[in-house]
């Protein structure tokens, strides 16, 4: 979502030049994995996360994990993502739940999601990879299967695999339920990744209604040792909007 001033493979250099030591991206699959690995190595970057294949984006798919009748497609997507993750040394994969089909039986959708997650969890476990599931707001993706932290936590508990974790995106959380600090406190032990963006416009995190300096201090106090993904759309040029990061870095130093 950032550094869109240049092409995908050029963004690694741009991120490194801006001071980032790690990157995440949504879907790497249209690029040869060796080309991505080359950029990561060249610029000494770690890839911390990407999504499983989403299905047919043009047709409205936003993942296939909860979609009845598409289990074979989901299982193939796990293998595709795993191949990329192993080559890129990516420690986390996000499983997109999907948009619930019109008129679908919620019970069948849940059973499908659980079955697919159990399959994916078993496939990635031997490689030390964590699976992420994320609550996403219904304004950005109407009909998305997961919308609340309690839902993701309940599913994680049902799966019962220690490497299935919650991906806690503060932007989606604020839109759907607010009370970000208390949610982080409640679920931090089950959190595998945190993401941020300004609310409501999904621009830089210093633009909007969420007090991110407070959130960052809270994450430290809770002992969160993972990465914080900048999943926002820059209001202008990416580098011009990084003042919030420079201010925070100076404050930490």
Image (cartoon, rainbow, N blue to C red):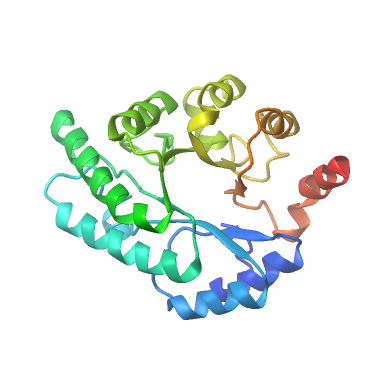
Q: Quadrant of the C terminus?
A: top right
Question: Could you tell me which residue is drawn at 35 percent across and 37 percent down?
Answer: 142
Task: Decide if residue 6 is in sight here.
Answer: no
Q: Is residue 224 left or right of residue 75?
A: right
Work out which residue is located at the far front of the displayed protein and give it: 126
Query: Residue 184, how many percent across, how many down?
Result: 57, 27
Q: Is residue 23 left or right of residue 80?
A: right
Q: Residue 1 sits in which quadrant?
A: bottom right
Question: Could you tell me which residue is drawn at 76 percent across and 61 percent down?
Answer: 19
- Name above or below for residue 209 compared with residue 201: above
- Name above or below for residue 206 compared with residue 232: above
Q: Nearer the viewer, residue 94 or 164?
A: 164
Query: Residue 188, how many percent across, how many down?
Result: 55, 29
Question: Could you tell me which residue is drawn at 19 percent across and 59 percent down?
Answer: 73
Q: Nearer the viewer, residue 146 or 237?
A: 146
- Name above or below for residue 121 compared with residue 236: above
Task: Decide if residue 121 is in sight here.
Answer: yes
């Amino acid at each position: 979502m950032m550094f869109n001033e240049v092409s995908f493979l050029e963004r690694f250099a741009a991120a490194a030049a801006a001071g980032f030591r790690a990157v995440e991206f949504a879907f790497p699959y249209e690029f040869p994995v060796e080309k991505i690995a080359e950029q990561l190595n060249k610029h000494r970057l770690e890839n911390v996360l990407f999504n499983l294949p989403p299905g047919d984006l043009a047709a409205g798919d936003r993942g296939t994990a909860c979609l009845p009748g598409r289990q074979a497609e989901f299982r193939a997507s796990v293998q595709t993502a795993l191949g990329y993750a192993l080559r890129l040394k990516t420690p986390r994969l996000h499983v997109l739940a999907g948009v619930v089909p019109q008129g679908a039986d919620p019970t069948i959708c849940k059973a499908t999601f659980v079955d697919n997650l159990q399959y994916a969890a078993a496939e990635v476990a031997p490689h030390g990879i964590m699976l992420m599931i994320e609550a996403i707001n219904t304004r950005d993706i109407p009909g998305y299967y997961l919308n609340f932290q309690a839902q993701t936590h309940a599913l994680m508990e049902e799966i019962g695999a220690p490497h299935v974790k919650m991906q806690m995106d503060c932007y989606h959380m604020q839109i759907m339920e607010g009370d970000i600090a208390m949610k982080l406190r409640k679920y931090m032990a089950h959190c595998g990744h945190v993401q941020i963006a300004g609310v409501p416009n999904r621009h830089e995190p210093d633009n909007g209604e969420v007090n991110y300096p407070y959130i960052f201090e809270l994450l430290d106090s809770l002992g969160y040792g993972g990465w914080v993904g900048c999943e926002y759309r820059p209001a202008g040029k990416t580098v011009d909007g990084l003042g919030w990061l420079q201010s925070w870095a100076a404050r930490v130093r």
